Image: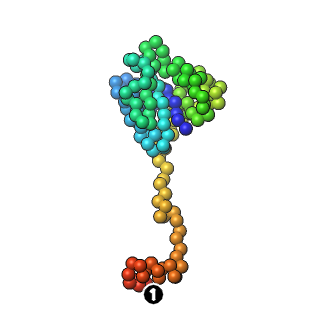
Amino acid sequence: MPYMIDGHNLIAKLPDISLDDPNDEAKLIQKLTAFTARTGKTCVVVFDHGLPGGSSRMSTRSVQVVFASARSTADRVMIERIRKIEDFRGWIVVSSDNEVLATARQRRMSTLHSEEFVTLMRSPPRPVIDAGEAAEVRLSEDEIDEWMTLFGGDGRKD
């Protein structure tokens, strides 16, 4: 499921990025890129007051970056997008703004408060199970003999 995220709301909840940092958006995009790589998800992150408004060259394959125009806000952009999305059940909206979250809930979209998403971002990656370790292989005596003949020697320990 893709995420739609209010970027500045999320930055305000992160302990290692400050809204006063001139590179705060770029730092968040790095974190989101790592998150999407780990989870296989995609996201759209919306920031306030970019010049010009609209999609940004900061976007990556998995993180689409959008800036609100000088005459709008991230909240307005998100509400407009929420209302236009046709497959609304596939989205999770992340914000601290009650109006944005309420609009998403009206469309039956999943929602997360920014604080909840910070916790999700910090969760460790799922363990990768090595198929060789997970499989329990049992060979018959005949199969073992066949493999021993194929690879030479009898090598059996009696």
Q: Is residue 120 left or right of residue 150?
A: right
Q: Is residue 26 left or right of residue 38?
A: left
Query: Observer-nearest residue: 81 or 118?
Result: 81
Q: Residues within 10 Å of mark 1 (few under 14, many from 20)?
A: few
Task: Determine the secondary structure under disc 1.
Answer: loop
Q: Is residue 149 left or right of residue 91?
A: left
Residue 97 visible in image: no
Q: Quadrant of residue 60?
A: top left
Residue visible at 54% across and 24% down? 81
Q: Quadrant of residue 91?
A: top right
Does residue 41 lie above or below 46 as drawn? Answer: below
Q: Residue lying farthest bottom?
A: 158
The x and y percentages for residue 137 are 52, 70
Q: Quadrant of the C terminus?
A: bottom left
Q: Quadrant of the N terminus?
A: top right
Does residue 155 lie above or below 42 as drawn? Answer: below
Residue visible at 44% across and 16% down? 69
Q: Give the residue pinned by disc 1.
A: 158
Query: Observer-nearest residue: 19 or 25?
Result: 25
Q: Amino acid at mark 1?
A: Asp
The x and y percentages for residue 89 are 61, 34
Q: How many marks?
A: 1
Q: Quadrant of residue 50?
A: top left
